[in-house]
Image (spheres, helix red, strand yellow):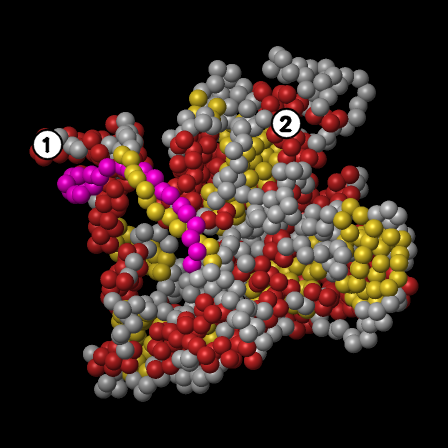
């Protein structure tokens, strides 16, 4: 299997932001061929570009006011915020290619905080699938990767680090390649490697010290995981002091706080893809938390009350007896009860957890901050066995479902454990946890094999074979990666580590190189893989140990958020997948905290219900006072309307419309949430023919557009109103008091005309790049216009003129393509759809998320509806759903999101909302009716892209009708009554 990289819309938006940040800034070529081109940091264009990005340049998301901060340093700082799992590594790799293409920058230093992140970056940058992808995008470019590794001590000559030498020797004369140096913060801080100047070599004729060699290249530094590189920390200071980068670009989901402040330390944040957008746009999996609820009333709970470093003492209090006990390093927690047997105080003071600078470290690796509570019951062997057993049940449930798809998905589970020795003894023998796990796994496999029996279903037979192979060598189904594995000499362990850490494709493959089943799918770690490492096919994380105090819940789930790839290496982006997160009951509020983090993601985000009462009341058809009273009685809010964070997941279940930002069913509590909707088998049978026909695969075919048509179109563009002056506004901001709050007011105080002329050659090149019209046709058309209409207004040959001309041309092109397109069927017979399995059998249930945001369990489900619950996206959809149960209707249903996938000429696909089977008025035959619902007053409210979606759908269903399917497609606006629409169809 080879992974296929695809370019996603948010990655194009990121690229647009990077291009804009560097657009037209002064970059001076360097006489030293081993150095980067030099950015003029005094160029005002840099600030202009970033200000444009802050204000939402060309449809990009605006940056919140509180995050519009910059440092006036002697380097250009740029920040890129991207949620875990959305492709940071891809984006910074693409950015390096782009900056090399735009300005010839050819020296990039990529800094990462840990070995696991380094291995992940290395794996991506060296992968064949990456090289193929980027060579297609940049045919004449290649990335030369050097990796700085710890140097082994040798006798004799002191050799200069080869990676730095390779990196430094790359020159600007090699136009088709650029140099990238990958290193960890540990290597950056290694004086033994970086600060020595007694090597037996000089580099570039002058340098014998690695720091000064890198400094001489005038590098651009890229930082991955910026929260691990706080500006006051040694690593960041070493970057500034020793590397002197002219530009630092930071990529991360999490950014550090400013020193002595809770404000985020952003420096020219130009792109913001936070968790709300990532979850809502289905760029990542949803999260479903599970908890084994076995908490006992008489259980011992210990609270860390205090600790001090000199002497090293800490005080724990038994929360039942309220009795405190002072402990020192080496003391055993069993003083409080036998359930803590074997757990000792390992360290008091500084910790290895970035989230807890100072605290108490236990011998099982758990790190506690002041105020943290530990539960005795979760350390018992019985409880851990329950968690292991449930994790295997969860895994096999997901694995079987993923295996029985048209294209299989290999399912992985990741376990975080409290002790390396519980998994692997010092002599590399299996630890007690691994032995117990493999025993339980064997029993589960045998049970599943028996349940499959002697089936004739070929795919089930294949799954049975997979399980049987797993059973033969149960030890090969799982592997571990721990921090000391990097230095091991054991070949079997190293092979295990390579599979987990370095060879992602091997782990995703169902078969090894010999064609035998590759059964490894359970990964164990002691929090070593908490950052940087991920795998798209992790569908479950099992937390058999605590991660410490108040570390970001988003960071915790990040290892499994990436969308999965199937057996052919294709990323699946059009379905709702969930990462199951299995936790112990000491973290029973995990889902609430995760929701709270996401909800509080944007500065100024209101956590008060009053802002949303009008919308909730409208949807629920109740008064605002009634809604407020309900929420108060259920303790979802306080008397002032503030949302109670510990109840936020319950609020989501009952009132999904109450919380803006994150859509419902993206983060769910598996112990509470009803997140599935059942499909009524008998009702589906009546609509199955329509469903089968509208799920046939089609492709778009276009009639050719002649050169003459293109020329005429561009000629008409030149005659349109596209000639305007380019201006820059001078804005003033002042604070004013309003309703007792200080708010910022902005106004335009003045404006200036700007000369942003573009050379004629560049004008032709840019029009060609943005429209596809050849430069030759554009030139001929301009000459013709000049001869027939008179001299062309010079304002055309500006950046503003280009933007307006392209926009006008694209309007014409969209209309033209709509007339010239047709839909042609593909010769593909796929029985698997969002409502049927790989054999074409209807599914028992589907995720609510693919049907609608809202669910109303207070109303009767219409008799003719194909689902057992009322699920919808808007008040209009709810009204349509509840009024469609009339005599003319045989059966109807909500069409799952992104299920039909009608191809659009603008890119992407569209899928209507409702499907009906209707009796004719005479009762002699049945008709099919498909509806696209828009909750707006009239066509003028439709966005341009929505208009084209509807027109494309009309053309698509007209094609189906011409092929013999009796189907009618209609759009439904807010004032369109579905009953009248149905009766009108029935009469015709």
Task: Reply yes or no: does residue 731 show up in magenta.
Answer: yes
Percent from the top left, x then y, of residue 343? 86, 58
Q: Which residue is mark 2?
A: 241
Q: Which residue is mark 1?
A: 790
In the picture, the quarter occupied by the C terminus is bottom left
Seen in the picture, residue 674 relative to 40 is either above or below; the reply is below
Relative horizontal placement of residue 420, taking residue 642 as reference (left or right): right
User: In terms of secondary structure, where does tag 2 sit?
Assistant: helix
On the question of residue 673 being in view, the answer is no
The span shown in magenta is: 712-738
Query: Callout 2 environment at 10 Å: few (<14), some (14 to 19), or many (20+)?
Result: few
Name the foreground residue: 76 vs 37. 76
Percent from the top left, x then y, of residue 910? 36, 60
Seen in the picture, residue 312 relative to 663 is either above or below; the reply is above
Percent from the top left, x then y, of residue 576? 50, 63
Give the mark toward the camera: 1 or 2: 2
């Amino acid at each position: 299997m080879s992974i296929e990289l695809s370019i996603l819309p948010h990655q194009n938006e990121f690229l647009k932001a990077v291009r804009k940040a560097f657009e037209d800034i002064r970059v001076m070529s360097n006489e030293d061929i081993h150095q980067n081109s030099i950015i003029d940091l005094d160029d005002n264009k840099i600030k202009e570009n970033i200000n444009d990005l802050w204000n939402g340049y060309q449809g990009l998301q605006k940056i919140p006011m509180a995050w519009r901060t910059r440092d006036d340093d002697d380097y250009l700082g740029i920040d890129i915020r991207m949620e875990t799992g959305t492709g940071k590594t891809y984006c910074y790799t693409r950015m390096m290619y782009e900056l090399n293409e735009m300005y010839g920058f050819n020296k990039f230093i990529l800094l990462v905080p840990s070995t696991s992140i380094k291995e992940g970056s290395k794996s991506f940058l060296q992968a064949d699938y990456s090289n193929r992808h980027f060579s297609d995008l940049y045919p004449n470019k290649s990335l030369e990767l050097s990796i700085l590794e710890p140097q082994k001590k040798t006798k004799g000559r002191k050799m200069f680090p080869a990676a730095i030498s390779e990196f430094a020797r790359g020159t600007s004369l090699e136009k088709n390649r650029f140099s990238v140096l990958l290193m960890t913060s540990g290597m950056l801080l290694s004086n033994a490697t970086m600060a020595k100047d007694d090597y037996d070599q000089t580099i570039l004729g002058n340098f014998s010290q690695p720091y000064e060699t890198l400094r001489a290249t005038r590098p651009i530094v890229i930082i991955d995981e910026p929260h691990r590189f706080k500006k006051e920390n040694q690593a960041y200071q070493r970057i500034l002091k020793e590397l002197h980068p002219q530009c630092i670009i930071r990529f991360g989901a999490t950014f550090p706080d400013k020193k002595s402040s809770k404000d985020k330390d952003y420096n020219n944040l130009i792109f913001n893809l936070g968790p709300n957008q990532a979850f809502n746009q289905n760029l990542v999996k949803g999260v479903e938390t599970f908890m084994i609820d076995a908490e006992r009333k008489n259980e011992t709970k210990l609270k860390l009350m205090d600790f001090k470093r000199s002497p090293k003492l800490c005080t724990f209090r038994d929360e039942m007896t309220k009795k405190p006990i002072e402990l020192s390093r080496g003391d055993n927690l069993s003083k409080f009860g036998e359930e803590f047997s074997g757990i000792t105080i390992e360290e008091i003071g500084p910790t290895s957890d970035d989230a807890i600078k100072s605290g108490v470290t236990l011998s099982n690796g758990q790190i506690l901050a002041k105020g943290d509570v530990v539960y005795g019951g979760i350390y018992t062997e019985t409880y851990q066995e329950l968690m292991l057993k449930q994790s295997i049940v969860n895994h096999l449930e997901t694995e079987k479902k993923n295996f029985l798809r048209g294209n299989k998905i290999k399912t992985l589970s990741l376990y975080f454990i409290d002790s390396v020795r519980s998994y692997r003894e010092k002599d590399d023998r299996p630890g007690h946890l691994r032995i117990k796990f493999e025993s339980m796994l064997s029993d589960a496999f045998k049970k599943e094999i028996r349940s499959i029996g002697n089936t004739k279903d070929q795919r089930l037979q294949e799954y049975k074979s997979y399980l049987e192979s797993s059973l033969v060598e149960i030890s090969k189904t799982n592997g571990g990666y721990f921090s000391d594995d990097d230095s091991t000499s054991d070949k079997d362990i190293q092979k295990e580590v390579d599979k987990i850490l370095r060879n992602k494709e091997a782990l995703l493959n169902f078969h090894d190189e010999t064609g035998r089943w590759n059964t490894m799918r359970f990964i164990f770690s002691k929090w070593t893989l908490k950052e940087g490492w991920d795998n798209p096919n992790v569908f479950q994380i099992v937390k058999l140990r605590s991660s410490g105090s108040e570390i970001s819940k988003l960071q915790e789930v990040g290892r499994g958020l990436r969308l999965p790839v199937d057996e052919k290496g294709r990323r699946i982006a059009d379905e709702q997948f969930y990462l199951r997160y299995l936790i112990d009951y000491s973290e029973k509020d995990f889902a609430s905290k995760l929701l709270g983090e996401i909800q509080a993601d944007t500065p100024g985000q209101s956590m008060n219900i009053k802002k949303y009462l009008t919308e909730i009341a409208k949807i629920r058809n109740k008064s605002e006072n009634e809604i407020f009273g309900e929420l108060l009685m259920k303790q979802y809010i306080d008397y002032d309307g503030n949302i109670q964070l510990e109840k936020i997941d319950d609020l989501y279940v009952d009132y999904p419309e109450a919380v803006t930002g994150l859509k419902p069913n993206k983060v769910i509590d598996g112990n509470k949430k009803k997140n599935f909707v059942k499909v009524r088998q008998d009702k589906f049978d009546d609509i199955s023919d329509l469903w089968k026909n509208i799920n046939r695969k089609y492709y778009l075919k276009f009639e050719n557009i002649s050169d003459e048509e293109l020329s005429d179109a561009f000629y008409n563009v030149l005659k349109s109103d596209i000639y305007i002056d380019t201006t820059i506004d001078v804005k003033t901001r002042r604070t004013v008091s309003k309703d007792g709050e200080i708010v910022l007011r902005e106004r335009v105080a003045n404006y200036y005309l700007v000369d942003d002329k573009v050379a004629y050659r560049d004008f032709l090149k840019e029009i060609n790049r943005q429209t596809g019209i050849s430069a030759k046709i554009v030139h001929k058309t301009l000459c013709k216009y000049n001869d027939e209409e008179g001299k062309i207004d010079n304002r055309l040959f500006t950046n503003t003129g280009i933007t307006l001309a392209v926009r006008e041309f694209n309007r014409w092109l969209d209309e033209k393509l709509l007339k010239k397109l047709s839909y042609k069927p593909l010769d593909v017979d796929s029985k698997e759809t969002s409502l049927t399995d790989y054999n074409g059998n209807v599914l028992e249930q589907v995720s609510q998320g693919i049907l609608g945001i809202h669910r109303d369990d207070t109303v009767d489900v219409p008799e003719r509806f194909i689902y057992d619950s009322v699920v919808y996206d808007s008040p209009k959809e709810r009204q349509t759903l509840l009024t469609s149960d009339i005599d003319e209707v045989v059966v109807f249903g909500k069409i799952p999101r992104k299920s039909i996938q009608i191809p659009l000429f603008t890119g992407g696909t569209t899928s209507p909302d409702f499907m009906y089977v209707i009796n004719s008025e005479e009762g002699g035959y049945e008709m099919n009716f498909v509806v696209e619902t828009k909750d707006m007053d009239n066509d003028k409210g439709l966005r341009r892209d929505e208009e084209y979606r509807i027109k494309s759908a009309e053309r698509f269903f007209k094609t189906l009708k011409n092929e013999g399917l009796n189907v009618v497609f209609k759009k439904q606006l807010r004032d369109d009554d579905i009953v009248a629409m149905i009766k009108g169809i029935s009469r015709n």
